[in-house]
Amino acid sequence: MRAASSWAARLVVGASVAACALASVPARAAGPVAASARRISLNETGRLHLTSKHGFTLNEEGLATGTIRGRIYLHLKIVSTNRVTAEVGIYPNGGSLTGKVAANYHVAGANASFSGTMSIVRGTGSYRNARGVGLGFSGTIRRTNDAVTVHLTGDLSI
């Protein structure tokens, strides 16, 4: 009996030592360490032409020039006499960016203008981790042919 209790005492002491040793080991972070994001300062201009019109929604396409060059598609919806919303798709080489826009809207004679913000909601390819919130988005609409010019400014994280 004495040998069994001595063995049990050594087992308890050994377990206690092991627990103390494990408690002193620093914890490691789970998963890989994230790489730091690269920032791009955007200054884009898009000159677009009407492809279709459905009620108060203008569907436009054209070319974006500036920091990121590529095709640009715009679905601009006039939601009230002073507000517009839009979905924007930009397709540079190597991926795409999709954004949502909310802006003020003002009509002055043959032209209308809008100014507000855009948030990047999705990216693909080399832009798959793109993030951009509060980007400046403005433009004009030539009401005679519904041609649109847009400007996008701000910092994009990729």
Image (cartoon, rainbow, N blue to C red):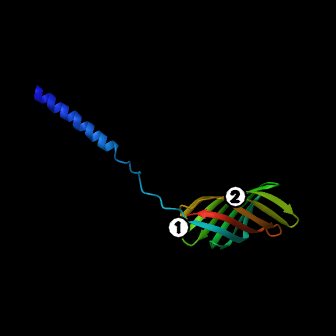
**In front here: 50 or 41?**
41
Q: Nearer the viewer, residue 154 or 112?
A: 154
Q: For residue 130, which quarter of the picture?
A: bottom right
Q: From what the image shows, is residue 88 above or below residue 63?
A: above
Q: Which residue is at a point 64% across and 60% down the rendered structure image? A: 99
Res. 81 image quadrant: bottom right
First along the sequence among labels 2 and 1: 2
- Give the SS element for disc 2: strand
Q: Which amino acid does label 2 sit on?
A: Val
User: Percent from the top left, x then y, of residue 54?
Assistant: 74, 60
Q: Where is mark 1, residue-wise? A: 126
Whether tag 2 and tag 1 are in contact, CB under 8 A, the answer is no
What residue sits 41% from the left and 54% below the top?
31
Characterize the local packing of mark 1: few (<14), some (14-19) or many (20 or more) Cα atoms within 10 angstroms.
some
Left or right: 121 with respect to 14? Answer: right
Residue 154 percent location from the top left of the image: 67, 64
Q: How many marks?
A: 2
Which residue in the structure is indicated by mark 2? 101
**Residue 44: mark:** none
Q: Three-letter amino acid code at disc 1?
A: Ser
Apparent side of residue 109 relative to residue 47 in the rendered image (left or right): right
Q: As drawn, is 85 to the left or to the right of 22? A: right
Q: What residue do we see at 83% from left, 69% from top?
A: 144
Q: Distance between the residues labelled 2 and 1?
A: 22 Å
The percent position of residue 149, horizontal first and vertical second, equals 75, 69
Quarter of the picture containing the C terminus is bottom right
Give SS at disc 1: loop
